[in-house]
Amino acid sequence: MNDWNIIHIDEMNSTMDYVRTHLSELPNRSIVWADIQHRGRGRGKNTWLSPTGGLWFSTLFKNKGVSDAWHITMAFSVAVVSTLKMHSVDAWIKWPNDVYVKNKKIAGILVENVIKGNQISQIVGIGLNVNNDIDETLEDKATSLLQQTGERHSIKSMLTMIMNEYDSIDSKTLYERWSQFSFRLLCTDVKLIDVKGKIHKGKVMNLFENGSIELKEESGEEIFKAGSLIL
Ligand code: BTN
C-alpha cells in the first residue's frame, strides 16, 4: 500500500465526515479507517451499520475533476470484487456501486465531491462486511465475508488488498473489467428508482463506460445517468 497516508482511529461517527472536517490538513491519497462508526452513512439518506469486525474507511483524492468521480467509483468496485474473488467469493457489481454475492449486499461505496475554492476533491467511502455480525433486520439483504467463507479475516489485510488492487488497475482495461463484473445485470428485469424518485420497470440492456444504464421499458428504451436498482 504505497504512498497512502493512513489514519487509523478506533471509533468515530463517520470516516466520511472525518475527512470532510479535516480536508485542509489531510494530503491527497489519505485513508481514514475506523474500527467502529457510530453514524455510518450510506447513499441517499441511508444509514450504514458499522459495528466492530467490518472494514469501514474513506479515501481522499485532491485536485481531481468531478468527471473523475465515476472512474474512481468504477475502480473501487473492481478492486473490491477482485479482492473478494481472491478469497473464492463470487462477488459482482450491482449498478451503480454496490457489491453483491448472489442476491445479498456485501459492500457499498459512497462517493462525495467537495468543492473548496478552486479545488475539487473526492471522498470515497467503502464499507465491507468482513467478520462483523449482520443485523437481524438485514439478514435477507446483507452478507459478510465470514458468512461466505466460514472464516475470519484480518481487516488490515483486506484494506491492503483492496488498495493494492485499486493501485494496480490499468485505466485501459477498467471498463472491460467493470463490465465483466456487472454482466449479471444484463437482460435482468429490474426496477430503477430515478433521481426524482420515479420507479421504472424494465430489462437492463446496456451499461455504458460513463456510468449510465439503459433500460428497456414498455414505453421504449431509456438511458439513466443515476439512480438505484431494485432486483
Ligand atoms: C452504500 O452502499 O449506501 C454506501 C455505503 C458506504 C459505507 C461506508 S463505511 C465507510 C464510509 N463512512 C461512512 O459513513 N460511509 C462509508
Image (cartoon, rainbow, N blue to C red):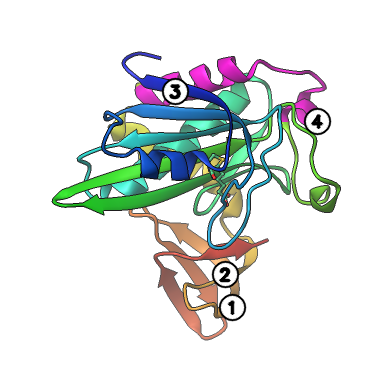
Res 121 quadrant in image:
top left
**Residue matched to label 1:** 199
Q: Earlier in the sequence, mark 4 or mark 1?
A: 4
Q: Position of residue 79 (x, y in %)?
A: 48, 30
Q: What's the CA distance linking mark 4 and mark 3? A: 28 Å
Magenta region, main secondary structure: helix
The amino acid sitting under disc 4 is: Gln
Q: Amino acid at mark 3?
A: Ile
Question: Which residue does the image show at 41% across and 14% down from the upper left?
Answer: 1
- Disc 3/disc 2 C-alpha distance (Å): 37 Å
Disc 4 C-beta below 8 A from ligand 1: no
Which is more N-terminal, label 3 or label 1?
A: 3
Residue 192's disc is 2
Answer whether residue 169 is visible to the viewer in this image. no
Whole-number angstrom distance, CA of label 1 to CA of label 3 = 40 Å
Decide which of 189, 67 is in the foreground and name it: 67
Question: Is the C-beta separation of discs 4 and 1 under 8 Å?
Answer: no
The residue sitting at the bottom extreme is 219
Report which residue position mark 4 lands on.
Answer: 147
